Image: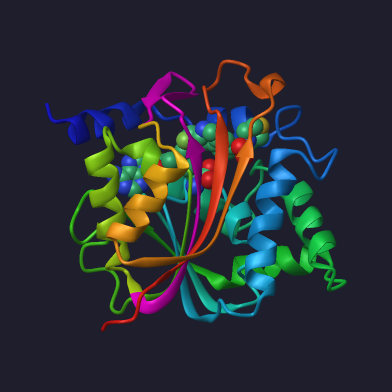
Amino acid sequence: MSGIAAVGESYQKFNPRAYLQNNYMPPRADFGSEDCVVPWKLRCLAEAFATGDIHGRTLLDIGSGPTIYQLLSACDHFEEIIATDYLEVNREVLRRWVQDEPDGFDWSPYIKHVCRIEGKGEQWKEKEQKLRRKLRQILPIDVHQPEPLGSQLCQPADALVSTFCLEAVSPDRPSFERALRNITTLLQPGGHFLLIGALEETFYLAGEAKLSVVPVSEADVREALSKSGYHIHDFRSYLMPPGLKIGVDDVSGVFFVHAQKKPVA
Ligand SMILES: C[S@@+](CC[C@H](N)C(=O)[O-])C[C@H]1O[C@@H](n2cnc3c(N)ncnc32)[C@H](O)[C@@H]1O
Ligand SMILES: O=S(=O)(c1ccc2c(c1)CN[C@@H](CF)C2)N1CCSCC1
């Protein structure tokens, strides 16, 4: 079985609820200080969109999983947001959130925090409803395919977002770089790409699933982006405090990149 096939097999045991518990609920997900990793991630995204440089008709989120935090600052800048994931269980979690079904994950701490740091006086329920209105498609994706969405995307997106996906689904650095090249075909030339990921992580847990992660450094990410034809506007790294290592992964840090696909020469 190929490395990519083995990754796909390992994801069959992925448990969205366990994944959310491990990474998005207190105490690990702490909003107590601006120096905590969750406020840091949300601030990176809010500041990128606050420049006013990133806007258009369609934003595509690659490997959304069961999460929506990564889309909160985008929803004022795009007409349509498209979420994607490899697993139906995750696409179903997102559909249930969009439909405001009962027993969904409570994203209100994240929505309230983003409204506060954006400083526009937006009420959190207003932002929640706006994102539900704009999140119009939830599509299957495989970043290891040359056409990751198959024939589902009629035209390239104006911007991409992707958080903790590429390194978590690639068995090695070459497949990480190929996956980045594949998803880049989904982005307009000149389009912006906001990428968040794990630094030097080798595994993470999601219920019964133990997923392998290809460890990447800042230099590895920069090289992969350069090979895929991006200009890097901003690259930030966050060093994980030791207290946050509780056994659900071995992540050493988190990176944030604001990159732009170079126009066709
Ligand atoms: C670590 S989770 C990231 C979820 C979310 N973006 C976040 O920020 O927490 C990785 C996601 O990649 C998805 N995935 C697995 N294999 C994939 C593939 N071949 N192509 C695209 N996504 C894949 C998984 O289903 C999972 O939702
Ligand atoms: O935002 S995080 O940095 C985060 C959030 C999500 C993930 C990781 C880290 C690392 N493992 C990834 C597996 F791919 C998923 N964070 C980790 C500390 S507690 C709050 C969540």
The image quadrant that residue 263 belongs to is bottom left
The region drawn magenta spans 188-213
Residue 135 versus residue 210: which sits nearer the camera? 210
Residue drawn at (84%, 40%) of the image: 33
Q: Position of residue 192 (x, y in %)?
A: 47, 71
Residue 93 versus residue 199: which sits nearer the camera? 199
Question: Image quadrant of ligand 2?
Answer: top right
Q: Is residue 19 left or right of residue 128?
A: left
Residue drawn at (57%, 15%) of the image: 247
Residue drawn at (26%, 84%) of the image: 265
Q: Is residue 120 left or right of residue 225?
A: right
Q: Is residue 43 magenta?
A: no
In the image, farthest residue toward the left? 1
Vertically, is 159 above or below 168? Answer: below
Residue drawn at (41%, 52%) of the image: 222
Q: Is residue 166 left or right of residue 179?
A: right
Q: Position of residue 131 (x, y in %)?
A: 63, 67
Q: Please tell me whether the stretch drawn in magenta is mainly helix, strand or loop.
A: strand
Residue 82 versus residue 200: which sits nearer the camera? 200
**On-image quarter of the N terminus:** top left
Vertically, is 45 above or below 173? Answer: below
Q: Is residue 205 magenta?
A: yes
